Image: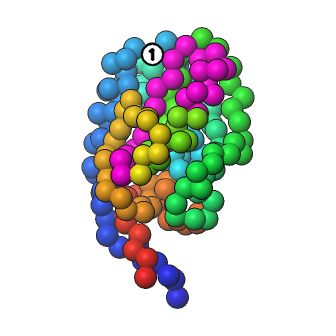
């Protein structure tokens, strides 16, 4: 028997799809030059793929890379330490970089990533997140582009997981712990 349950859908598939389209419009309006899109794995992969599929509407043709970071492990709260598991290989010197992540919670992951990429020579670094929780912000960081603000729930689906489960769900659902 599981010690948790996933039932309550907070954001459905249609709402996600509609918001992705408006986020792409917002990103394109910044007129990025020499765009490099970096997805934070594993949670961002579905969101990143949907964003990228819509870039063609604005004639955006980014280079794409991935960064694997960890701060949660198998826990439901951040450890407070961000560890690089897999680094990017793309040259970002002089590029406008868009970092795509699943959720902005404490802000540590994105703040560290932005600083790292600027130190490596990016011309600019913007962030795009699917979800934003403001209740646990540990550092002063705001996303440039944000899909949805949610309350302080542990959520899964659309790439987000609980102990590497539930990423396949087409919606965002709340995890209830028993």
The residue under label 1 is: 32
Q: Quadrant of residue 104?
A: top left
Residue at 49% of width from left, 12% of height from top? 33
Magenta span of residues: 113-135
Locate residue 100 relative to residue 23 in the image: left or right: right
**Placement of 97 over or under 150, stated as above or below:** above
Label 1 crowd bin: few (<14), some (14–19), many (20+), radius 10 Å: some
Q: Closer to the camera, 176 or 21? A: 176
- Image quarter where the C terminus lies is bottom left
Task: Inspect this view and state whether residue 16 appears.
Answer: no
Residue at 42% of width from left, 18% of height from top? 59
SS assignment at label 1 = loop
**Placement of 54 over or under 155, stated as above or below:** above
Image x and y of residue 17, in percent: 32, 45
Image x and y of residue 155, in percent: 42, 61
**Placement of 111 over or under 41, stated as above or below:** above
Residue ranking furthest to the bottom:
1
Q: Is residue 68 magenta?
A: no
Image x and y of residue 97, in percent: 53, 23
Residue at 41% of width from left, 51% of height from top? 136
Q: Closer to the camera, 20 or 75? A: 75
């Amino acid at each position: 028997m599981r010690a948790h349950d996933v039932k309550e859908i907070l954001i459905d598939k249609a709402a996600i799809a509609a918001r992705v389209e408006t986020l792409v419009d917002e990103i394109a309006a910044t007129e990025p030059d020499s765009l490099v899109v970096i997805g934070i794995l594993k949670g961002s992969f579905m969101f990143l793929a949907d964003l990228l599929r819509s870039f063609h509407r604005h004639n955006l043709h980014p280079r794409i890379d991935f960064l694997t970071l960890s701060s949660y492990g198998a826990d439901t709260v951040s450890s407070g330490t961000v560890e690089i598991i897999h680094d990017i290989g793309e040259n970002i010197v002089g590029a406008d970089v868009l970092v795509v992540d699943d959720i902005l919670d404490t802000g540590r992951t994105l703040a560290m990533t932005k600083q790292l990429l600027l130190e490596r020579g990016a011309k600019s670094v913007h962030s795009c997140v699917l979800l934003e929780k403001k209740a646990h912000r540990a550092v002063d960081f705001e996303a440039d582009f944000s899909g949805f603000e949610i309350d302080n729930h542990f959520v899964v689906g659309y790439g987000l997981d609980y102990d590497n489960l539930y990423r396949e769900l087409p919606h965002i659902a709340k995890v209830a712990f028993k």
